[in-house]
């Protein structure tokens, strides 16, 4: 099983990885929120290329991270949204919201 995590990458980059579900969501939420608040970068990019599987919890995490970045007054974008997350976003009517930088 792949470890789920959100880590700091290059300047202004957060790396989300692993399985995003009800078991991993709460810890990832806390980790991501702390990293966003601690970041000194003028803008943030969340790279989802290492996400192996996601439920709707993953989409909820992205929305929470977007709100955290907005509260920190930092532009926020998402890179490499996995297909399962993209499908959930489409069904939920959130595709456009997630595509905006």
Image: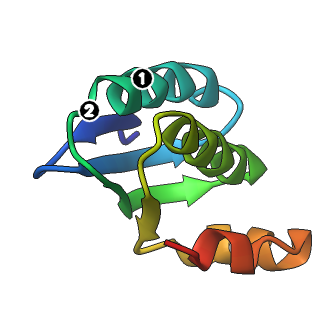
Looking at the picture, tell me which residue is in the foreground, 33 or 89: 33
Disc nearer the start of the sequence (1/2): 1
For image coordinates 76% across by 71% down, the residue present is: 89
Residue 82 placement (x, y as % from top left): 52, 72
Q: Quadrant of residue 26?
A: top right
Looking at the picture, tell me which residue is in the foreground, 78 or 86: 78
Q: Identify the residue at the far left of this view.
A: 10
SS for dot 2 = loop
Q: Is residue 55 above or below residue 67?
A: below
Q: CA distance from mark 1 to mark 2?
A: 12 Å
Residue designated by label 1: 31
Q: Identify the residue at the far front of this view.
A: 73
Query: Is 74 situated left or right of 39 in this image?
Result: right
The quarter of the rendered structure image containing the N terminus is: top left
For image coordinates 56% across by 34% down, the residue present is: 71
Query: Is 54 situated left or right of 32 in this image?
Result: right
Residue 53 placement (x, y as % from top left): 55, 57
For image coordinates 31% across by 54% down, the residue present is: 43
SS for dot 1 = helix
Residue designated by label 2: 39
Residue 46 placement (x, y as % from top left): 38, 56
Residue 97 placement (x, y as % from top left): 70, 71
Mark 2: few/some/many CA within 10 Å (<14, 14-19, 20+): some
Q: Is residue 40 above or below residue 48?
A: above
Query: Is 90 situated left or right of 28 in this image?
Result: right
Q: Nearer the viewer, mark 1 or mark 2?
A: 2
Q: Quadrant of residue 79?
A: bottom left
Looking at the picture, tell me which residue is in the foreground, 96 or 49: 96
Numbered mark located on residue 82 in the image: none
Q: Identify the residue at the far right of this view.
A: 92
For image coordinates 16% across by 47% down, the residue present is: 9
């Amino acid at each position: 099983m792949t470890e789920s995590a959100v880590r700091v990458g290059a300047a202004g980059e957060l790396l989300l990885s692993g399985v995003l579900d009800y078991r991993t969501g709460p810890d990832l939420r806390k980790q991501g929120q702390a990293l966003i608040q601690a970041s000194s970068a003028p803008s943030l990019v969340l790279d989802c290329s290492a996400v192996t599987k996601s439920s709707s919890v993953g989409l909820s995490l992205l929305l929470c991270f977007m709100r955290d970045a907005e509260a920190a007054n930092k532009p926020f974008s998402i890179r490499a949204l996995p297909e399962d997350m993209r499908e959930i976003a489409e069904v939920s009517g959130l595709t456009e919201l997630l595509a905006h930088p």
